[in-house]
Structure formats: C-alpha cells, structure tokens
Image: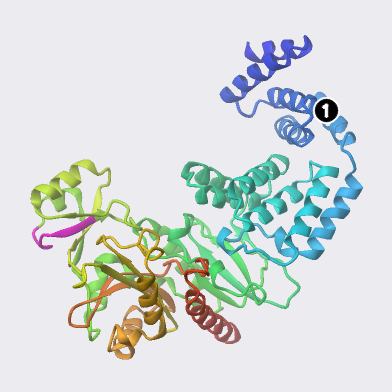
C-alpha cells in the first residue's frame, strides 16, 4: 500500500520517496489522518514548521486521539523560535492598523494606508517568531492585497487556512483573491468552505460607526452591489450576510441601523431574492433597494418599465428557450443574443438572420437566451459611445463614458487610455451631462422613479435625436475610483459625488429607524 510504503521510506530516511508516496495517498484520500501527520513530519524535517503544525492539526481533526499526532504537534510548537515576541509584534501591528484583521471586504476596497510598510514589517517579525500564527498570515494577506500583490496575498491566506481551517473569513478572502486572479474553480471551493463555516460576517467596532447589514447572494462580484468600494469605512460598519434560501440568517443579536440589499436581478438568483424579501419583511429596520423592486431591471421587463419615460427608448428584449428562439419572429433582425444572466459581454453576439441565429444556438451550451433588437448607435465620427449613469435616491449622477470602435463597448476594452480627446470628452460629460442629454433633469428623474430602486445604474447611448437609449439597468453596476490618476484625474470627483450621495442616503435611512 502507498501509505505503508511511505511510512517505510520515512523510517529508512528516504524522505523524497516518502514525500512522493504520501502525496499520492493524499490525492486519493485527502483526509487520511496518518498521511497528513506523516506529511507534517516531512515538512518539519524540511524546516517548514508552519506547514507542519497545520498538517498536525488537520490530522487531529480527523483522529483527535492519535497520540503520535499529538506528540508531533507538541514537539513542533516547542520548536517555534519566539512565540511571546511574535504575539507582541502582531498586537503592535493591530494597534497601528486594526483594519488588517477584517477579511470579508472586497479586495478592491483594501487601499494602502500611512505606515503600511511598518505594519508589514511587524507582521513579518511576528511570523519569524511564530510561523504558526494564523491571524498574522491572514493580516499579511490583507496588507499584500492593498499592495496589489494578489498571488502573494492568496498564498498568505492559504497558509492561514492551513493553520486555522475553521475561520470562515480566511476562506472568504482567499476566494475573492482567486476570483481576481481568474481562477473561478478555486473561488468556488473557497466560497463553499467559507459559507460552510458561517454566513454572517460582522465587522467589530467600538460603537462609533453606523451599522449596515448588507444582504448578499452567494455568487461572484457582478451579482452583488460592491458597496465596499463606495462607503466611508470610518463611518460605516458593513456586516455581510450571505443569504441562505432555506433558512433565515442567524444574526445572534447583531445590531444594525439599516439594511442594504446588495443582491441584483439575475434569474438564477430568484431564491436569494426571495430570501432577501422574507428577511426584509420580517424585520423592522429601513431597507435600501427593497428586493421586490429588482424586477424592473430584468432585461425582458426593462422596456415596459421605462415605456412612459419621456425622451427614453429601450430596445425590445425577449427571453426565450432554445426551441422558442429558433422559431421566434417578434424580435426583428439584426438582433443581439446572449445567454440569460450573462453580463460583461459574455456570450454576446450580433446575428443578422435566422441562419446566423441557429448557428449561434448550435454552438452555445446555454438553454435560455435574451434576444434584443439591435440598434446601431455608432456616431457620425465612427465611434460607439456608452454612458454610465448611477442613481442614488432618485438622483442621477454621471459616472463614466466609454468610447470604442466596437459595438460591444466596455470601459476596460475601450480606447480611453490611448486618446486624450476621449478623456476630454468624458470629463465634459461628467461635468456637464446636459450637453449630451438635453433633457437630463426630466428624463433621468422619470427614469429613476420608473425603476424605483434606491441605488442602481444604467448603461445608455444617445440617439441622433437626443433621446436616451437604455441598454440595461442593474443595481450591481461597478462603481469605483481606482483608475489611473495621471490619466483620469477627473474621475475621482465624479465617484466622490456618488459616494457622498450614498453616504447621505445611509445616514437618512439609518436615522429614520
């Protein structure tokens, strides 16, 4: 047997053979306590005490009475260089920057702070004295995230998890970093591990902050409002709750002033939206973005929701099964087709006739699709323009303008960094949106009322007649101020206006409780 062979190889001093054999065993049986403990001894022999201690602890979770594992763990703990000094250094880092112990925030909200290099040095000193200090590994991951060293940050969080597997916030942070790095499978594994350990992630504080209970669906960033990127963390404590469609959240007396429903409208999130509605109806605090109002932003509903808004047009969209799409006649060609719940241009194509639509359907794994009448919004100069406008409590705020040679316009793939004239045009839009949309006050005020959400965004274009052509509306449209300041200095004030309006909304609703 591979494990017996691995143990024999260890006894004979053939450590590389033992390592190869025990890894083979753990690939087949990942929770084998004897194999975990053996791998721990091999790590300890190689000088990696942190990995060894994590493996011994993992072995004892599966076999708490294993005398060999207990003895090996005790021996490793005794060999730690200087635990008292390590804990003192970690405490000093926390006193200097208590925010490094919060691990449930969006990575994009973790910004550098004054004295961060000294804090990192304290954490490294702590880990030199006690490499098994899981909290110090996690806090180092937090600091590395702020430095945008995402791969190193993920490694630090995974080391923390190995040492303290039951801390759900470490899994949560690791999952977010895996998502940043494009590893969706790792994101799903870490997220599942986090939610298996808890669905409520409060933010401890001294009572000086506003307590905001934020309802999230279990999903990646695009399905939830990235509230972390906009709020003032000195004033607002965000208590993150991942909704369980089968049970209400266990808040255990958690205090909060206002509820922010961060879930956006996705067909696959219907159970989470229903859970958010049940929770909102069963409690007494004010609710921002009531879940029952999300339906107006659904692609097939949007045209009807905005039908009576003056100066606004919305292309017809129909949501159809594969079989229905093959024979549909209601949406004229050319049309844009994409799988249901697809965002960010994923799976989006223009098709000009029935044959092209059948070819698209034959190559797509999806079963349901949104078909939208295609409107060519290219301007006379040959460029496509997409304007993003964010609504806070019914007031419209210009957020950005993306200019592209492609009809699928995204800010990240546009030519904004390449052309100064584009940035100048965007700055003009942010300073004076009425120059683009002459009926800014009346059209956008009516649009905000028609959707009815407290916070959401739209992507739109301008028709030759000056009307607002709305592509989509979504509560979770990304809003941030992380663009290059040397190229986009005008973006930060625009984001600040949105953030200030959101802060005012939270203050008014929180005070109204």
**Image point (61%, 28%), residue name:** 30
Q: From this viewpoint, is residue 163 visible?
A: yes
Position of residue 299 in the picture relative to residue 291 (left or right): left
In front: 79, or 294?
79
Q: Does the stretch in magenta take in 312?
A: no
User: According to the image, label 1 marks what residue?
Assistant: 72
Label 1 packing within 10 angstroms: few (<14), some (14-19), many (20+): many
**Image point (84%, 58%), residue name:** 91
Q: What's the magenta bit mostly, secondary-structure-wise?
A: loop
**Quadrant where the C terminus lies?**
bottom right
Image coordinates for residue 321, horizontal then vertical, percent: 20, 52
Position of residue 462 in the picture relative to residue 330 (left or right): right
Q: From this viewpoint, is residue 446 visible?
A: no
Image coordinates for residue 364, horizontal then vertical, percent: 25, 44
**Image point (14%, 50%), residue name:** 357
In front: 470, or 487?
487
**Image point (15%, 44%), residue name:** 359
Label 1 SS: helix
Q: Does the stretch in magenta take in 333?
A: yes
Image coordinates for residue 66, horizontal then vertical, percent: 79, 26
In front: 251, or 8?
8
**Quadrant in which residue 442 is drawn:** bottom left
Instruction: Specify the segment rendered in magenta.
Output: 329-337
Q: Is residue 362 above or below residue 266?
A: above
**How many labels were placed on the picture?**
1
């Amino acid at each position: 047997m591979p494990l017996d062979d691995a143990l024999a190889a260890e006894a004979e001093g053939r450590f590389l053979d033992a390592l190869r054999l025990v890894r083979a065993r753990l690939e087949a049986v990942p929770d084998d306590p004897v194999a975990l403990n053996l791998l721990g001894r091999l790590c300890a022999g190689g000088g990696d005490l942190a990995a060894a201690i994590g493996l011994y602890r993992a072995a004892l979770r599966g076999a708490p009475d294993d005398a060999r594992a207990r003895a090996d763990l005790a021996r490793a703990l005794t060999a730690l260089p200087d635990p008292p000094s390590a804990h003192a250094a970690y405490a000093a880092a926390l006193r200097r920057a208590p925010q490094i112990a919060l691990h449930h925030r969006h990575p994009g909200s973790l910004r550098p702070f004054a004295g961060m290099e000294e804090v990192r040095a304290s954490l490294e000193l702590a880990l030199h004295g006690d490499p098994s200090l899981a909290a110090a590994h996690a806090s180092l991951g937090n600091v590395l995230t702020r430095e945008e060293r995402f791969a190193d940050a993920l490694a630090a969080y995974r080391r923390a998890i190995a040492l303290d597997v039951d801390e759900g916030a470490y899994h949560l942070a690791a999952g977010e970093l895996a998502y940043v790095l494009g590893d969706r499978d790792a994101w799903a594994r870490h997220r599942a591990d986090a939610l298996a350990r808890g669905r409520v992630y409060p933010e401890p504080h001294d009572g000086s902050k506003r307590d905001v209970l934020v309802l999230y669906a279990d999903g990646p960033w695009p399905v939830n409002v990235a509230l972390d990127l906009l709020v003032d963390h000195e004033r607002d404590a965000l208590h993150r709750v991942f909704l369980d469609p089968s049970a209400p959240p266990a808040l255990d007396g958690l205090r909060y002033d206002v509820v922010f429903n961060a879930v956006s409208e996705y067909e696959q999130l219907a159970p989470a939206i229903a859970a958010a509605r049940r929770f909102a109806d069963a409690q007494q605090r004010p609710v921002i973005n009531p879940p029952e109002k999300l339906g107006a932003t659904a692609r097939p509903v949007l045209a009807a929701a905005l039908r009576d808004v003056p100066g606004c047009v919305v292309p017809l969209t129909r949501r159809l099964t594969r079989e229905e799409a093959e024979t549909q006649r209601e949406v004229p060609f050319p049309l844009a087709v994409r799988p249901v719940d697809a965002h960010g241009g994923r799976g989006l194509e223009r098709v000009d006739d029935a044959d092209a639509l059948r070819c698209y359907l034959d190559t797509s794994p999806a079963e349901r699709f949104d078909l939208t009448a295609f409107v060519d919004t290219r301007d006379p100069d040959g460029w496509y323009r997409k304007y993003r406008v964010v609504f806070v409590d019914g007031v419209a705020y210009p957020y950005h303008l993306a200019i592209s040679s492609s009809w699928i316009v995204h800010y990240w793939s546009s030519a904004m960094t390449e052309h100064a004239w584009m940035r100048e045009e965007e700055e003009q839009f942010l300073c004076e949106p009425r120059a683009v949309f002459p009926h800014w006050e009346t059209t956008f005020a009516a649009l905000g009322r028609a959707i009815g959400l407290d916070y959401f965004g739209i992507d739109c274009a301008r028709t030759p007649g000056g009307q607002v052509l709305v592509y989509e509306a979504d509560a979770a449209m990304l809003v941030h101020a992380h663009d290059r300041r040397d190229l986009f200095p005008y973006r930060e004030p625009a984001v600040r206006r949105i953030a200030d309006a959101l802060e005012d909304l939270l203050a008014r609703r929180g005070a109204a409780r």
